[in-house]
Amino acid sequence: MHFNAYGGNGAALAAALVNATDFSPGAVEAMLTEHRLVRTVVTAEQAEELRVWVGRLSPVFGERDQDTQIKLINDLLDVTASKPYVSAHDGREPHLHFFDPSADVVSRAKDTTAGGLAMAMSFAGGHRLGRCDRDGCEIVFVDTSRNGRRRFCSPACANRVNVAAHRARGLAR
């Protein structure tokens, strides 16, 4: 499934922020750049603002109750200045923006993540905003698989669960 139409870099940036362990300015700048934001220079205070924002993003991933998930996303949208519009700047194909291009980097990141999660929820279903099913793993992901049934953050976590289940079956005999 091509997920760009369903949240694109905003949903992916939200997942990356939730999974981040390093909120130093350099690490945050690299993450914002990787997810195609422009003018990504951040101060230590701005990096901390984004770390706090993660507390609002995180509960959206893996929430199984659709009404709760919708409320969480609407709460995110309520605190942003997100106003979608189409842009084709810098030689890029037309795409949606969720922020005022002159806004500061924190506002742009918040608007992008809230808008991306709203798009993912609206066009692909909230189940695509997942949290790893392996006990003890808190990694979140945007499920871009064809069938939308991804349960684990990585093959390594899936293998651990499957090996443990296999061993448990062997002991039960």
Image (spheres, rainbow, N blue to C red):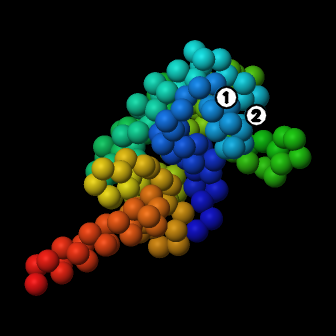
Determine the secondary structure under disc 2: loop
Circle 2: residue type: Val
Residue 65 is tagged as: none
Horizontal side of residue 10 vs 161, given as left or right: right
- Which residue is tagged 2? 38
- Which residue is tagged 1? 26
31 or 124: which is nearer to us? 31
Circle 1: residue type: Gly
Question: What is the x, y in percent for residue 86?
Answer: 74, 43
Question: What is the x, y in percent for residue 105?
Answer: 67, 25
Determine the residue positioned at 49% across, 27% down. 51
Q: Is residue 142 visible?
A: yes
Q: Tell me where residue 83 sits by quadrant.
A: top right
Determine the residue positioned at 49% across, 36% down. 21
Asked whether the residues under the numbered discs 2 and 1 touch, taking CB atoms below 8 Å apart as contact, a structural biologist would say: no
Q: Quadrant of the C terminus?
A: bottom left
Q: Quadrant of the N terminus?
A: bottom right
Question: What is the x, y in percent for residue 165?
Answer: 24, 72
- Outermost residue to the bottom: 173
Determine the residue positioned at 38% across, 56% down. 132
Horizontal side of residue 146 vs 138, given as left or right: right
36 to 134, vertically: above or below = above
Comparing labels 2 and 1, the label whose residue is closer to the camera: 1
The 10 Å Cα crowd at callout 2, few under 14, some 14 to 19, many 20 or more, is few
4 or 159: which is nearer to us? 159
51 to 118, vertically: above or below = above
Question: What is the x, y in percent for residue 112?
Answer: 61, 37
Determine the residue positioned at 18% across, 79% down. 169
106 to 131, vertically: above or below = above
